[in-house]
Amino acid sequence: MTHDDDTDRTADGRAVDQRAIKSAHASNMTGKSVRFRDESGIARHGRLDGDRVVVGGRTYDVEDVDLLAPVEPTKVVGVGKTYRSQIEELGEAVPERPTLFLMPPKAVVGPDATVILPNDEDRICFEGEIGVVIGEECRDVPSADAIDVVAGYTCVNDITNFDRVDQGLVQAKAFDCATPIGPVVAPPASVPDDPMLELHLNGEREQRTSLSKLLFPVEELVEYASSGMTLEAGDVISTGTPAGVGPIHDGDTVKITIGGVGTLTNHIVR
């Protein structure tokens, strides 16, 4: 059996992830990249080809593998108040610049993962967002060069515990399972110029927007997020949520769809 050193998870798991992201970015890969666990329990990177996952010379049926979050970020950079619709819904002023915060790696879960809500908290809400995946280590990137460091786009649910917002965004957003990501990283070439985002809760549409409605374009967000802070390959900038944020409860199913990317589905339990 062929042993694929460049795709196996070893003790140096994050280094494997970094190499895979860099390789896909450098080759301007037009296929969607996924991360999955095969039948032997090894986490691998591959390319989604219809209902198959291709890794080197081997092919897996997508139904026979467990899809994971497509990247393992060192951090997820959240952005607040980026859609006018949400700002108006909240009755707040339009900001002059983006508001940034961070979610840790343990907050990240993948497609079809179960999101376990914190106990004794009532106001925990979905926030459908377009995620920008960074393709190479970078810092102080000017907006004119920003797309050069973008590996692609993915779906993000920036789940927020509004019972803890007054205690700070770490308490509100950084808990385990708070940041579902996936199902793929879709390179810019495979995504429409103005992709639509829709979030459905138990089959009912709750949010709908498009990338062009961001107050701060992706290029500006990359420039601002990388100002003085190193972004690493696989890090994700979650670009903010539109109007329509609402609560999630035990037994709910949340689906986030982005044109050209796919659908991220997660199940909520307490």
Image: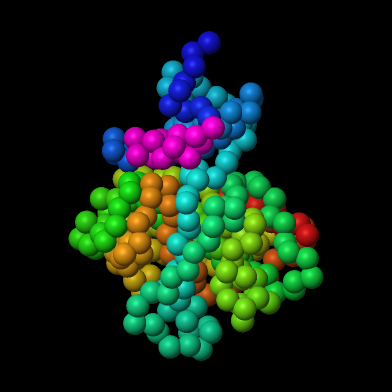
**Could you say where residue 239 lies in the image, as x and y percent from the top left?**
43, 64
Q: Is residue 14 visible?
A: yes
Verify whether residue 42 appears in magenta.
no
Identified at 29% across, 57% down, the residue is 139
Q: Which residues are magenta?
A: 11-23
Up-down relation of residue 150 to residue 205 (above or below): above
Location of residue 226 in the rendering, given as x and y in whole percent from the top left corner: 33, 61
User: In the displayed structure, does residue 48 sit left or right of residue 64?
Assistant: left
Furthest toward the front, the residue is 11
Identified at 53% across, 83% down, the residue is 89
| Residue ID at (22%, 62%) | 142
Q: Does the magenta stretch mainly form a helix, a strand or a loop?
A: helix
Q: In the picture shown, does residue 71 fall above or below 102?
A: above
Q: Is residue 269 above or below residue 41?
A: below
**What is the x, y in percent for residue 79?**
45, 69
Residue 203 in sight in this render: no
Give the residue at the far top of this rendering: 1
Which residue is found at the position 42% from the left and 59% from the top? 237
Image spot of residue 251 (x, y percent): 77, 58
Q: Nearer the viewer, residue 204 or 176?
A: 176
